[in-house]
Image (tube, grey):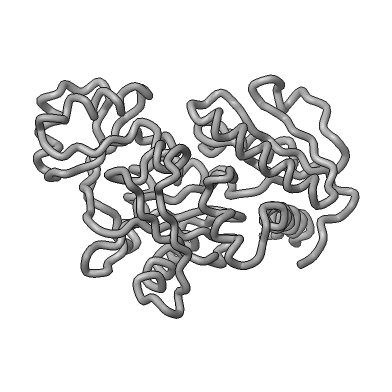
């Protein structure tokens, strides 16, 4: 692996003001400490405290984006850093905006022949009878989830019309359109990537009905199995379709694709996360560890990806068409 140039200043962005602030702060602290343990000087910045356009940046900065949720992964931050001409990890503004809005990403993948569970997008101010009508058309059980949130915030599994009201109320707390998505019965998988190169996939066995916020960050009984794709045809299948999704969407750096493999082994893409967590419970570091990478090396590789991509953009010959 190449080394990060010594003149480059690493800036970890974490915190922010989205509902995912707590997880973002934890991801940022873990990443910053891991990089310091490998000898790097790291600047930690919380955009909730300072305007990126007005702050004093160190010489030759490169941003390690550990922001989750609105602003950090919806294309807004990426557009701002592009204007400031500051390299950053992860996908560009167009890809980030597309993947952050679940309905747009799902339609994009469906149009290109990839499978994602049937869904409906409902305005959060819609009356309950209309919601029940849409839910009945999809069929129970189903998931209710805010269209633009991560970390499984606001997500509920609705087994019947009787618990529709409760799930609807939870999803509507975030005051954005709500996705009603058919629940596919099967195994939960996640496939991390670094620049379209797959890391080992992980099969998830939560003790909860599904892999929700509590199962991700609080429940020690959730089991994770890193699977060798050469020994498991389902692992190979979900990795292949995840790689297709990343290439079609144009992701960069570290990302993660979440899927369900149904009882026939067919993979259904749930979402593509362009700013996955880096906490002690997070899945991307867990997968990287199977390759012998600690969190510091994973972050170094992600930063090198960003530095190389932006350097190549600057040196690319301009078109004279």
Q: Horizontal and vertical percent for residue 284?
A: 55, 54
**Quadrant housing the C terminus:** bottom right
* Figure disc tally: 0
Residue at x 10% of width, y 33% of height? 161
Q: Tell me if residue 229 comes above or below residue 141 in the rendering.
A: below
Pick whichever, 309 or 319, lies toward us.
Answer: 309
Residue at x 79% of width, y 48% of height? 37
Residue at x 39% of width, y 75% of height? 232
Can residue 78 be seen from the camera position used here? no
- To which quarter of the image does residue 157 belong? top left
| Outermost residue to the front | 221
| Outermost residue to the bottom | 230
Q: Tell me if residue 234 comes above or below residue 289 in the rendering.
A: below
Judge left or right: residue 152 versus residue 128: right
**Quadrant housing the N terminus:** bottom right
Q: Horizontal and vertical percent for residue 290?
A: 58, 65
Judge left or right: residue 68 versus residue 178: right
Judge left or right: residue 233 versus residue 209: right
Judge left or right: residue 258 versus residue 141: right
Residue at x 24% of width, y 62% of height? 262
Q: Horizontal and vertical percent for residue 200?
A: 51, 66
Can residue 199 be seen from the camera position used here? yes
- To which quarter of the image does residue 241 belong? bottom left
Pick whichever, 203 or 7, lies toward us.
Answer: 203
Q: Horizontal and vertical percent for residue 188?
A: 34, 56
């Amino acid at each position: 692996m190449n080394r990060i140039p010594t003149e480059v200043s690493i800036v970890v962005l974490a915190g922010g003001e989205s509902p995912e602030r707590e997880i973002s702060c934890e991801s940022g602290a873990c990443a910053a400490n891991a990089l310091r343990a490998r000898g790097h000087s790291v600047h930690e910045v919380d955009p909730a405290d300072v305007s990126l356009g007005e702050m004093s940046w160190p010489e030759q900065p490169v941003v390690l984006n550990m922001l989750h949720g609105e602003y950090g992964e919806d294309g807004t931050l990426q557009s701002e850093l592009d204007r400031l001409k500051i390299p950053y990890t992860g996908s560009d503004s167009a890809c980030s905006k597309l993947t952050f809005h679940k309905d747009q990403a799902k339609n994009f993948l469906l149009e290109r022949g990839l499978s994602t569970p049937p869904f409906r997008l409902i305005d959060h101010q819609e009356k309950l009878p209309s919601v029940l009508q849409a839910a009945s058309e999809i069929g129970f059980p189903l998931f209710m989830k805010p269209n633009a949130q991560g970390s499984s915030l606001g997500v509920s599994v609705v087994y019947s019309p009787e618990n529709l009201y409760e799930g609807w109320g939870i999803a509507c707390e975030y005051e954005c359109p709500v996705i009603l998505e058919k629940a596919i019965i099967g195994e939960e998988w996640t496939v991390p990537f670094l620049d379209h190169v797959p890391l080992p996939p992980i099969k998830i066995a939560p003790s909860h009905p599904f892999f929700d916020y509590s199962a991700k960050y609080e429940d020690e009984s959730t089991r994770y199995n890193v699977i060798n794709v050469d020994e498991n045809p389902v692992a190979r299948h979900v990795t292949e379709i995840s790689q297709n999704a990343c290439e079609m969407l144009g992701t960069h750096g570290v990302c993660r694709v979440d899927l369900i493999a149904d009882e026939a082994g067919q993979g259904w893409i749930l979402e593509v996360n362009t700013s996955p967590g880096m906490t002690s419970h997070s899945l991307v570091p867990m997968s990287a560890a199977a390759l012998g990478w600690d969190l510091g090396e994973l972050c170094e590789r992600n930063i090198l990806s960003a530095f190389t991509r932006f350097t190549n953009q600057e040196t690319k010959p301009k078109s004279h068409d």
